[in-house]
Amino acid sequence: MLAFANDLNPAPLDPFFQGYGVQLTDAQGRYGFKTIKPGDYPTMIPGLRRAPHIHFHVTGRIARLVTQMYFDGDQLNDQDPLLQCTQGKERLIVKLQPPTPGLEPESLVADWDIVIPQG
C-alpha cells in the first residue's frame, strides 16, 4: 500500500489495496477493471472533503492525460474544489449502471470513455 507523508487522513490503510493498478487497452482501445467505489476524504481546508473519485493517468503513443472520474449523484460533487473548477466537468461524472449478464449481480458498471488527443 502506498502511504504519503502528507496524507493526513486518519482512516486505516487497507492492506489488500496497493494504491494503483495498470491496465492495457485492447486493439480497439477498450479497457476494463474491477474495483470498489472509493470514499470521500478530507482536504487541508478544515471541513472540506473531496468527493469520491478515481484517478487516471493514461499514456498513449504520443500524449498522456491525467484526469479523475467522479460518480453521478454524489452529494459532495457540488463542493469538490477540483471538480468545480474544471471546464466541461460533466464529462468527468459517470452514472453507475446495473451489471451486464455474467457479472456479479450486486456489482455496478461505470461506462466511461477516455480520449487522448493525438493518442
Image (spheres, grey):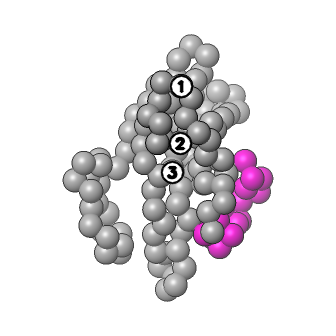
Residue 92 rendering spot, x and y as whole percentages:
67, 50
Secondary structure of the magenta portion, mostly? helix
Residue furthest right in the image = 88
Q: Residues within 10 Å of mark 2 (few under 14, many from 20)?
A: some
- What residue sits 37% from the left and 45% below the top? 20
Residue 1 rendering spot, x and y as whole percentages:
26, 52
Judged from the image, the secondary structure of the residue bearing numbered disc 1 is loop
Residue furthest bottom in the image = 46
Q: Which mark is residue 54?
A: 3
Q: In the image, which is nearer the foreground, mark 3 or mark 2?
A: 2
Q: In the image, which is nearer the foreground, mark 2 or mark 1?
A: 1
Give the labeled residue for mark 2.
108
Q: CA distance from mark 3 to mark 1?
A: 25 Å
Give the labeled residue for mark 1.
101
The amino acid beneath tag 1 is Pro
Judged from the image, the secondary structure of the residue bearing numbered disc 2 is loop
Side of 38 relative to 1 (left or right): right
The residue range painted magenta reads 76-91
Magenta span contains residue 102:
no
First of labels 3, 2 by sequence position: 3
